[in-house]
Amino acid sequence: MSMKRLAMLTGGGDCPGLNPVIRAATRRALQEGYEVLGIRNGWKGMIEKNFIPLDRRAVAGILHRGGTILGTSRTNPRKMEGAVEKIFENFKGLNLDVLIAIGGDDTLGVAYELYRKGLATIGVPKTIDNDIPGTDYTFGFDTAVNIAMEALDRLHTTAESHHRVLIAELMGRHAGWITLHAGMAGGADYILLPEFPKSMVEVAEALKKRHATGRTFSIIAVAEGFKIEGEEVLQTQEKDAFGHVRLGGVGERIAKLIEKLTGFETRSVVLGHLQRGGAPTAYDRVLGTRYGLKAVELAMQGQFGKMVALHGTEIVAVDLQSVTKAKVVTQELYAEAQTFFG
């Protein structure tokens, strides 16, 4: 009887915690008698049949490392002629029994479509944005929030010294989870999220009231996807393979408007890719590890078309179909943050 074969890939943006997933899934699968393959560079590797064998040595010493040893890409097989057929062909050619796709809504959306067409796929939710429905938290989020919080802590000292308003532009296209959590943890005086429109006049008035009480500086945390008077601020009109435009520049735009409306000297800083780099926190290492173990458990049980998820403290399986829309910040949570505005 031939040995079962399990493959895994990482797609979309890199994220702290990917390597703990790869390590845990590999170690568990090897213990259960699987041969394990790592697909290089996301769906691109499945199309090009680009892979490496994974054994204990291959995953040794990667628990604390950020990024992904398998590499990643934003390749979308659904937009490439013959790509889906090529994936099926390579799945069969590699004698695979299951493919574990580790990624965000785009990567998992492809995994679900392939499952519907008959491929044995299992999903692991990954995004620093924490916007995948069906799970309480995604790994990478805690690390990103801690990095953003540290940045806000540091901005406080320079803002206070120079009596300035400082704007921190954080990641978050449609969902403001990083900005909400980092803003609350870092003591931001105003938090601007994609989910909740705010006029710059309203923000300026809140800052004026704050400064009238004797405060000489303010910190604003803004998500990159926040719309100014209904419009997204873009770096470029070009779109990636999944149809996403490149956001960026909202912090600088807000800084100019706030300075004009208040007369306060205002500066902006963009954290950008710093938020997704570096070593994962303890929380993300443990969460990634538990996800990797559960994904292999689902593979052993033949529970394909599922995604591992965190519900409370339990790791469970939910339908991959549940990732088709973004999980956004609720009005109740934003109301809690608003207590500290101004």
Image (cartoon, helix red, strand yellow):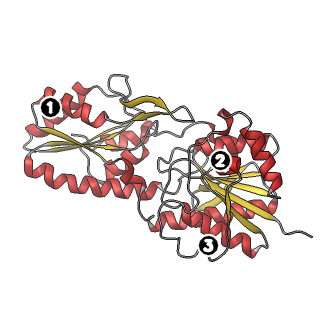
Alpha carbons under labels 3 and 2: distance apart: 21 Å
Nearer to the camera, 36 or 40: 40
**Residue 302 percent across, percent down from the top left:** 82, 57
Nearer-N-terminus badge (3/2): 2
For mark 1, give the secondary structure: helix
Query: In screen coordinates, is 336 left or right of 256?
Result: right
Residue drawn at 15 percent across, 26 percent down: 261
Alpha carbons under labels 1 and 3: distance apart: 53 Å
For mark 2, give the secondary structure: helix
Q: Quadrant of the C terminus?
A: top left
For mark 3, give the secondary structure: loop
**Where is mark 1, residue-wise?**
259
Residue 202, quarter of picture: top left
Query: In screen coordinates, is 184 left or right of 287?
Result: left
Residue drawn at 80 percent across, 40 percent down: 117
Question: Which one is closest to the eye, mark 1 or mark 3?
Answer: 3
Q: Residues within 10 Å of mark 1 (few under 14, many from 20)?
A: some
**Residue 146 percent across, percent down from the top left:** 36, 58
Residue drawn at 37 percent across, 22 percent down: 230
Residue 257, quarter of picture: top left
**Where is mark 3, residue-wise?**
58
Nearer-N-terminus badge (2/1): 2
Nearer to the camera, 279 or 221: 279
**Where is mark 2, residue-wise?**
43
Residue drawn at 29 percent across, 42 percent down: 339
Amino acid marked by disc 2: Trp
Alpha carbons under labels 2 and 1: distance apart: 45 Å
Nearer-N-terminus badge (1/3): 3
Amino acid marked by disc 3: Ala
Query: In screen coordinates, is 240 left or right of 183?
Result: right
**Residue 307 percent across, percent down from the top left:** 67, 51
